[in-house]
Image (tube, rainbow, N blue to C red):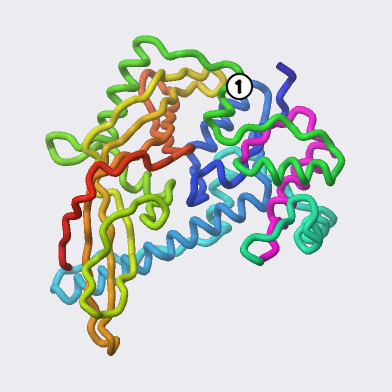
């Protein structure tokens, strides 16, 4: 295999929410350093990841402040307010993990904007809106930082179209690329089927992290992990009975959460990747899903809330980094999908 100078990550590597995962960055920074390579993230990608994280934090802050006010009404002393964060905090955390932040120069930014305006290269029209400047910008910045060519680069992005079109516009060869970190391991060609004792340790870790124990909880946060990495909106994949209609305004979905993980099954082989020293496998999780709804009466003065729950199966590719015969959870990073709704019987609960 040719010498790898850098592995480059796009924002979509980090799931649908595109929020940074510093553990993942640290893992791949370390893997790259063991092979005399670097991990690169474009300045544009870092800003995008940081902004998504700030938005999620602001949403959590608002919910926390509302709960604190409720606790005060109950006569219970609440903890202090949650601290705000900004994009600079997130950018510093990513850089602190050891990633190289690739700068965007003025000429590349100008050309990227023209790509969007002129619908060339990565530029395209989606739902009547011109897009593509950010995609063009990060690819252009990486090529420029690499001396004007793509030699020695491996790019991880789910948007191969933007990569290929921008490289063609710049006049360089399309670098080797993978759509996610799982595919990257195969591209590095250092994967093998895991054997004992790693296989047993991985199985035990999956059960311990995801499945609700006899004490009523798992050691991980499976629901939060799934919600941050997958679109749980029923509008895309489940055809379930409509909510009750008695002439009031239409129900609006407020939130969808994974409230429980009942079982976890490993599908196929567990792979050991020597390049990144990690284990990965396709896993199917049997979960309980809760959808929360709200509506107003015709006058807009009365608000009603409701929730419905039902079991379903979700599949995703898990990866875990190896550390002295233990694992660091690294998330459901790629190929998260909803496999099956186990029952269309809806458990209704007025709220």
Q: Tell whether position 257 is magenta.
A: no
Could you say which is closer to the camera, residue 23 or residue 81? 23
Residue 339: quarter of image? top left
Q: Is residue 249 above or below residue 254?
A: below
Q: Is residue 214 left or right of residue 100?
A: left
Of 276 and 319, which appears nearest the observer? 319
Q: Residue at x 54, y 53 (%)?
A: 90
Where does residue 53 sit, x and y in percent of width and height?
49, 56
Q: Which residues are magenta?
A: 129-157
- Residue 260 visible, this angle: no
Q: Position of residue 305 (x, y in %)?
A: 22, 70
List x then y, in percent, for residue 311: 23, 45
Task: Looking at this view, name the residue that lies furthest to the bottom.
Answer: 299
Residue 12: tell me if it is visible.
yes
Front residue of 309 and 243: 243
- Residue drawn at x 53%, y 17% as measured from the top left: 191
């Amino acid at each position: 295999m040719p010498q790898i100078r850098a592995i480059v990550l796009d924002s979509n590597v980090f799931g649908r929410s595109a929020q940074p995962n510093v553990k993942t960055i640290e893992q791949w920074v370390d893997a790259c350093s063991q092979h005399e390579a670097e991990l690169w993230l474009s300045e544009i990608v870092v800003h995008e990841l940081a902004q998504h994280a700030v938005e999620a934090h602001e949403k959590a802050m608002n919910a926390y402040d509302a709960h604190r006010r409720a606790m005060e009404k109950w006569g219970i002393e609440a903890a202090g307010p949650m601290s705000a964060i900004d994009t600079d905090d997130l950018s510093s955390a990513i850089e602190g993990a050891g990633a190289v932040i690739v700068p965007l120069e003025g000429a590349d930014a100008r050309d990227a904007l023209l790509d969007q305006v002129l619908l060339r290269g990565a530029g395209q029209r989606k739902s009547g809106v011109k897009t593509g400047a950010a995609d063009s910008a990060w690819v252009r910045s990486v090529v420029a930082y690499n001396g004007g060519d793509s030699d020695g680069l491996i790019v991880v992005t789910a948007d191969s179209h933007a990569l290929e079109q921008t490289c063609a516009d710049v006049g360089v060869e399309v670098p080797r690329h993978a759509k996610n970190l799982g595919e990257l391991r195969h591209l590095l060609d250092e994967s093998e089927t895991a054997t004992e004792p790693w296989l047993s340790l991985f199985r035990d870790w999956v059960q311990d992290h995801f499945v609700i124990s006899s004490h009523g909880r798992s050691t991980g946060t499976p629901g939060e992990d799934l919600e941050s990495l997958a679109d749980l909106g029923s509008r895309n994949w489940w055809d379930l009975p409509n909510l009750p209609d008695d002439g009031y305004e239409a129900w609006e979905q407020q939130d969808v959460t994974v409230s429980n993980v009942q079982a976890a099954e490993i599908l196929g082989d567990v792979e050991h990747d020597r390049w990144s020293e990690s284990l990965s496998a396709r896993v199917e999780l049997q979960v309980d899903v809760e959808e929360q709804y709200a509506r107003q009466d015709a006058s807009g003065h009365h608000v009603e809330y409701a929730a419905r729950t039902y079991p379903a199966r979700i599949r995703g590719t898990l990866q875990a980094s190896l550390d002295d015969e233990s694992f660091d959870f690294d998330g459901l990073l790629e190929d998260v999908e909803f496999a099956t709704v186990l029952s269309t019987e809806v458990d209704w609960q007025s709220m």
